[in-house]
Image: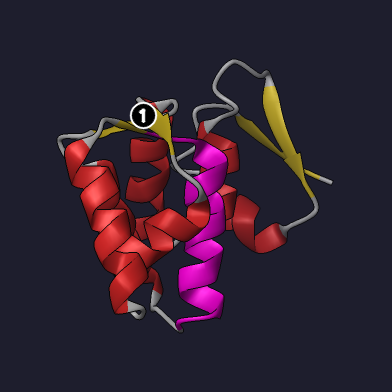
Amino acid sequence: MLAVDTNVVVRYLVRDDAVQAARAAALIHENQIWIAKTVLLEAEWVLRSVYNYSPERVTEALRVIAGLPTAFVEDAPVVAQALDWSERGLDFADALQLASAGAADGFATFDRELAKQAKPLSPVALILL
């Protein structure tokens, strides 16, 4: 199994460089790959900020890479939950942090909008500071 960097994931999804996209696709399709949560978090940022993907398109792209038969995602149930919440309007980074907080007693934030959006979804108490 090979762990992949964000740039491999982005090249595979965006295909804006034919040579690198082909190399990324060959690596991904011919090997089992390990995708860290941080790689998905960074890929989301790159797709949204650099490639101007809409939140819906970002979520779709992340589901594509995570759903490949050769892909193994770190903490897959948490990532799946974060993607579901992202589809319901939460920022992906916020959703991933909140989904990762399952064993905590609460989730403290200054972000009023996050607290409002996440309250009906959160598995832990939301604490607005």
- Please give the count of numbered marks on the rendered protein: 1
Q: Does 35 sit left or right of 107 as displayed?
A: left
Image coordinates for residue 98, horizontal then vertical, percent: 57, 38
Residue ID at (39%, 31%): 2
Image coordinates for residue 66, horizontal then vertical, percent: 28, 43
Q: Nearer the viewer, residue 115 or 26?
A: 26
Quarter holding residue 75: top left
Helix, strand or loop at label 1? It is: helix
Residue ID at (53%, 69%): 46
Residue ID at (49%, 74%): 48
Q: Does 6 sit left or right of 81 as displayed?
A: right
Quarter holding residue 54: bottom left
Residue ID at (68%, 26%): 106
Residue 92 visible: no
Instruction: Say what amino acid the circle numbered 1 marks.
Output: Ala
Above or below residue 42? Residue 125 is above
Which region shows up in magenta? Answer: 34-51
Above or below residue 89? Residue 72 is above
Return the residue found at the far bottom.
Answer: 52
For label 1, the crowd category at 10 Å Cα-Cα, with few meaning under 14, some 14 to 19 and many 20 or more, is some
Colour scheme of the rendered structure: secondary structure
For label 1, the residue is 76
76 drawn magenta: no
Q: Nearer the viewer, residue 13 or 85?
A: 13
Predominant SS along the magenta part: helix
